[in-house]
Amino acid sequence: MRLHRTPPTTTARRLVGLALAPTMLALAAAAPSAAAPRADAQQAQAQAAQRHGGQDTLRRAAPRDLAVGTAVAGGGHHAEQDYADPFAYDVEYRERMAAEFSSLSPENQAKWEYIHPRRDFYNFYPMDAIVRFAEENRQVVRGHTLFWHSQNPEWLEQGDFTDEELRAILKEHIQTVVGRYAGRVQQWDVANEIVRDDGSGLRVGPTSEGGNIWITRLGEGIIADAFRWAHEADPRAKLFFNDYGVEGINAKSTYYYELVQDLKAQGVPVDGFAIQGHLSTQYGFPGDLQANLQRFDALGLETAVTELDVRMVLPENGIPTSAQQAQQADYYRRTLQACLAVEECNSFTIWGFTDKYSWVPVFFAAEGSATVMTDDYERKPAYYALQSTLRDARRGGR
Ligand code: G3I
């Protein structure tokens, strides 16, 4: 089992992103500190950890070689709610995130529409803040995402670019963003959701119908280029495919299984395959999840669970029944157990840890309670299912 630690950064590496785009206006937070956390921040975080569980947290329970992560709320659906940006303003949220988790994923803050809102302008503020927070709290970061059909800025989607210009735009984006965080991001979701839901092929077609602009305009070969450019910009980052609906062995996951073999045969630097894990108690648990992760592991890839949540149709009073809570806990436990049973499944992330900020009720009418804590940070049976499973694995020597 390999241990993955974010190695110390160097000034030279941090400057790569800026050097690649010398004419860009780069709106950035103050220069990030070196990897060594600042003493005052560390002390504050230690005190916060005591207030929110002390030793009794998920990251403390976890085996040393498993990063246990959460999405960091911000952007996306949060922008439409009546609360301020959670990561910037909710102190209790930040403290609990530091106490409970050893890995952070920007929920929206590193997506194209946020980090590259105009062609000649990058907004690094939110992602810089997340990376710095992670370093202060000895957490690793999963970067999300570089190559997607969704949440692209209007200038890109509506722009009248030649194929050659589009290719240059993608290359510059990947090298600028990955280069900026080189040595500070453990894993990147390079290509996100590139396969059609029925597994019949890549998302080719109009963007209005869910087509991936890059593959549609530039052909399948652009996928390999995206991985190559990311690898050039940060040779230490682990580069992943990431998708939903690929938990079990099905047409969609099998498409990826064949695609990664083709790419590996060409020497493309693909390191991992990640399942998102947006599950619902309405549907059966994908019992072949472990077998699916295992077949990718057998190809020499790392695997990861990157966006787990388990939603449910709520009763009229909005409160889940005990049977629903038990079923949810069971789904969380089994997903974690599947990852723990696969040797190179080293990263396990939930898509938010409190219902207060979950994307689920915004997307699915009458559904909710998908995370492991209530709005008031009360731990649910699902939380305890994760904690006890992590403890068992740690005691068992994983
Ligand atoms: O872009 C529209 C804008 O044109 C419109 O005016 C505005 C008002 O309704 O909505 C904007 O879209 C929002 C979008 O984020 C863009 O930022 C959606 O309403 C909002 O619901 C959406 O939320 C994010 C979603 O990704 C977008 O697909 C969520 O916050 C985020 O949790 C979610 O995360 C994704 C992962 O990245 C990939 N896997 C699935 C996961 C859950 O959907």
Image: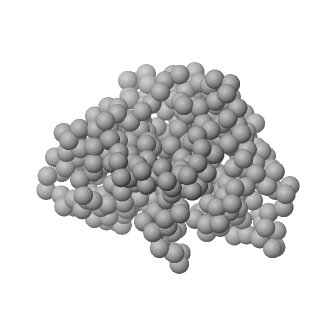
Colour convention of the picture? one colour
**Residue 200 visible to the viewer:** no
Q: Is residue 352 left or right of residue 314?
A: left
Q: 28 or 366, which is in the foreground?
A: 28
Q: How many badges with numbers are in the image? A: 0
Q: 187 or 58, which is in the foreground?
A: 58
Q: Position of residue 318 (x, y in %)?
A: 77, 70
Instruction: Write down the quadrant of residue 88 in the picture.
Output: bottom left
Instruction: Write down the quadrant of residue 12 in the picture.
Output: top left
Residue at the image position 86 percent from the left and 55 percent from the top: 323
Reply above or below: 256 against 115: above
Q: Position of residue 215 (x, y in %)?
A: 41, 46
Q: Position of residue 329 (x, y in %)?
A: 75, 48
Residue at the image position 73 percent from the left and 69 percent from the top: 366
Q: 243 or 377, which is in the foreground?
A: 377
Residue at the image position 28 percent from the left and 43 percent from the top: 34
View extreme (left): residue? 23
Q: Position of residue 62 (x, y in %)?
A: 60, 36
